[in-house]
Structure formats: C-alpha cells, structure tokens
Amino acid sequence: MALPTLVIGNKVYSSWSLRPWLLMKHAGIAFEEVRIPLYGPDSQARITAFSAAGKVPVLVDGDLRIWDSLAICEYLAERFPERAGWPRELAARALARSASAEMHSGFFALRSELAFNAREARSGVIPSEAARTEIARVVSLWGECRARYGSGGPWLFGAFCPADAMYAPVALRFLTYGVELPPAAAAYAAAVRAHPAVEAWIRDARAEPERLEKFERGHAA
C-alpha cells in the first residue's frame, strides 16, 4: 500500500505546512514529502494538481485529498488516535480543540507582524499593541493548558497532541523575534525548539535556496 503524501511549501516560510508535518513526524507516521516552493512561475499549477483549493499543505492518502492544516491534524487524530490523537479526557480534549481552533482562525496581528521565518533570527521588529495583546493571549492560553493538564510531560496537555502541532510555529516565532516570555511559556517554547523533528525542519529550511522578499519584509505565511 502506498504511503500517504504530504504536500508542503517552503520550510522557511510555510508555518501551516509545519503543523501536520510535525504531527506526523512526532507520531512516527511514514509519509512521502512533496515540497513545492511558493510563488514560483508554476507553483500554483503544481499545488492545484493536488488540491483545487490551491493551497498547501495537502495530505494525499489513497483516493483522499485532505487540505488545510487543522483538517489534516483532525484526520490524523482519527486514523492514529494512539499516536496523533487528542487528549483522552473529554474536558482536556475540548480545551485542546478550542485552543487549536483559536490559533487556526485568529492571531492575525501576531502572524502578520512576526512573519514565520525558520531560517534566521530577526531583530528590530517592535510588535504593535494589537500584536502584544495577542502574544499575551497565547501566553495565557499556554499557561491554562499546562496548569490544568500538562503535568504528564512538557507539552500543552502533557503528551504531544495536535494542539502542540498547531502552536509550534508560534513558539518558533517568539524565538525568532526574541519575544520576552514568562518562565513557563519560555520553557514550553524551548521544548518545541528542542523537538528533533523541529530541529530537522529548521535544518532543511536553512538549506533552501529560495528567498522571498515579501516574507522577509514581514508578511505572514
């Protein structure tokens, strides 16, 4: 049986691609990786060949095409509940899903002003009041998850789950831009950065030849 295929964008810039990629790597789910550099002359045609939505990531599993990071994470959680699933406890699972949905649909100022860049540290970016408010919300949310359900390990709910995959790019953004964090949030961001799969992603990102100035200037990916 053929392995599933995960179609991703540039590892330097595509935070949405990182999310399901990290969940699959952490869970030990074997897959083929197809990287399509974004904004090239044939990028859109190549992506559309996998999904009519025309965006990455896309997971191809047999006849199925699953697009959108959160939808892919949900699919993986259903297929591999022991390795990639949500917390087992109902209340914890509800909080994990709520936190993931909030990440998926919000934090626009944070994402725009602190553009994802896995290649290098950035300096001189001063977040706006809106971005600072969103940073404080992330820190508060991480603290709530860790305080209520994180005693079993270093992750938001103790064991790694889709919520950690959804927030991993945010943790990396904080590190990239030197955002000052309270000790608990800083420890969580450090755990994300130390994950072997995250290290591999960053290593690959630094080896990519593409440099897209529109993202280097601070637009979200």
Image: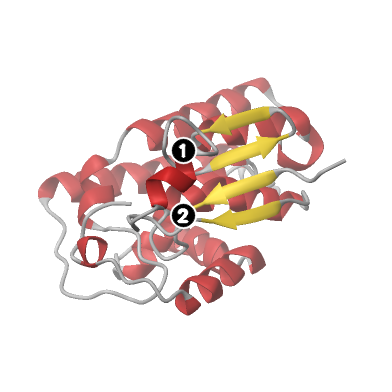
Residue at coordinates 20% horizontally, 45% vertically from top-left? 109
Q: Nearer the viewer, residue 149 or 168?
A: 168
Q: Earlier in the sequence, mark 2 or mark 1?
A: 2
The relative height of residue 66 versus residue 183 in the rendered view (above or below) is above
> Residue 187, position in %: x, y?
50, 63
Secondary element under disc 2, as helix, strand or loop, is loop
* Label at residue 48: 1
Position of residue 170 in the picture relative to residue 80 (left or right): left
Q: Quadrant of residue 44?
A: top left
Residue 78 in view here? yes
Secondary element under disc 1, as helix, strand or loop, is helix
**Label 1 Cα neighbours within 10 Å, binned few <14 / some 14-19 / many ≥20:** some
**Label 2 Cα neighbours within 10 Å, binned few <14 / some 14-19 / many ≥20:** many
Residue occupied by mark 2: 9
Q: Hey, what amino acid is under mark 1?
A: Thr
Position of residue 122 in the picture relative to residue 98 (left or right): left
Q: Nearer the viewer, residue 155 or 183?
A: 155
